Amino acid sequence: MMFLHEEIYLLEYEKSSNKKLFYAPIRGYAELIDQQDAEVIEQGNIFSMEDLDKNDNVRKLIQGLRKIPLKDLDIMQKGFPILNIDFSNGCNMKCIYCYADRGEGSIKYQKKENIDLIISAYFNYLQQQANFLENEVCYITFSNNAEPTFSPDLLIYTVEKIRETALRYGLKPLFSMPTNGAFVSDIRSFIIKNFDRISLSFDGLESIQNEHRPFSDGSPSYEIVYQNAKVLYNSGIKIGFNVVVTAKNLNSLKNTVDYFHQNFSGTEISFSPVNLAGRALKEQRNLMIDHSLFQSRLIEAIDYAKETSIKILDKDMQNYHIPRRHYCTSTARPNWNVNLKGEIFACMESKIEAMKIGEINFNTHELRLCYDNIQALKAYSVAQNGKCINCFAKYLCAGGCKVRNEKTSKNCNDIRLKCLHLINQVYEEEQWFSKGQTLFKIERGRGVRR
């Protein structure tokens, strides 16, 4: 609702039915108010500050609110597009839930001369952008469709080539990648030396890891992944863990939290519900989990983790600490995700026509960009999503993923419940730090500050 030209919402306060949270999303502001003050606001009879002569509490609330600057809701458009290069379609594991059927079939590799073309085209593109400045950071990652360390020579070659090219352009590359963690010690040392952050797909509990994520020959993977994870963790590299949740470990999330607390204290883990596609759909139908039950178990695990050193990230809510108009950088910038054919997609996961923004012809060395698609993706924001108009959570979920929204009907009620819980949680946590009035400050690293 609009109140004195401010977009505000009165939210349920989880600790008391006699209180409300006065929430102004565009300022990242929340304050606890009495029910009677909430009723004054809800009556809709206040049109100016002069109308508040009989309610000093609400006057002070609005005066405090207006001292807080407006948030930069276009933050996802800041910076350069992320570059992601596929090296192959191969994997040394045969995970029972792999949506892409990796670990079997014929394997294709990218050629080094094609990698050179991709790198050259990307940096030339950056130099042509209006926001190009020397000494800026550019973010590089490698393959979500296959295991990047499966092609160690290409990984090493590409990192070194990018460092060399970025130096000529006066840019600073930061490297990250998802990995299954099943690599040899030489690559482990290379990762520690060159990478800023690693997202390690590791399901933790030994029995679950070995059942979920065997090697392509069927042998258990736990021991080698655990040892690599431990070395990376002890090296000080930024490392986060992604745990896939199926019917086999849905009721073991608290045990999984304990496992990471005991073995990788202070790290972040993300619980991702299984995606019933590819091998997960064809061979393992008993992996299916109920969405509502998963959300319930996830909230239980998040609350449980508060008493440990572990921070849990809901994969769908990792950006929910950042008020914004765009769901992710894939649409806001958009990113460059280059496959083995040279096709460029905005999204790392969804290689569909609507997300295709161009291609590099490896024969003619020509870069062709689809500027209509690029502009359409940049324009996709919560402001264009009619169902979000009156939703208090719209700048936190940002309307959701473009691809998933088009394929399925999003469960907005679950999202609202999670966002309401988040806002309450942030409000309560910040009482321990200060009496300031600002939520969701990025500077604190955790994304939250009052």
Image (tube, grey):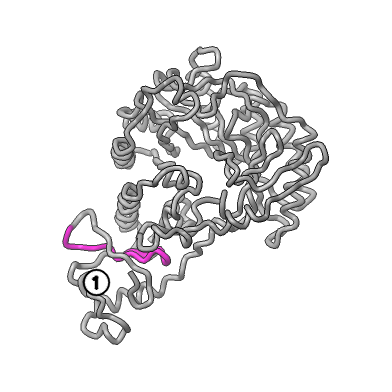
Can residue 381 be seen by looking at this rendering?
Answer: yes
Element under disc 1: helix
Please tell me which residue is depicted at 37% across the width and 72% down the height of the picture: 65
Depicted 215 relative to depicted 201: above or below: above
Residue 404 pos. (x, y %): 47, 44
- The stretch drawn in magenta includes residue 22: yes
- When asked about the image quadrant of residue 148, the answer is top right
Residue 395 pos. (x, y %): 43, 59
- The residue under label 1 is 42
Front in this rendered view, residue 423 or 342: 342
Depicted 344 relative to depicted 389: above or below: above
| Relative side of 447 to 238, left or right | left
Residue 149 pos. (x, y %): 63, 27
Depicted 104 relative to depicted 349: above or below: above
Quadrant (top left, top right, bottom left, bottom right) of the C terminus: bottom left
Front in this rendered view, residue 335 or 443: 335
Please tell me which residue is depicted at 42% across the width and 43% down the height of the picture: 408
Task: Report the amino acid beneath label 1.
Answer: Glu
- When asked about the image quadrant of residue 90, the answer is top right
Q: Which residues are magenta?
A: 17-30
- The stretch drawn in magenta includes residue 185: no
Count of numbered marks: 1
| Relative side of 161 to 139, left or right | right
Please tell me which residue is depicted at 29% across the width and 66% down the height of the picture: 22
Quadrant (top left, top right, bottom left, bottom right) of the N terminus: bottom left
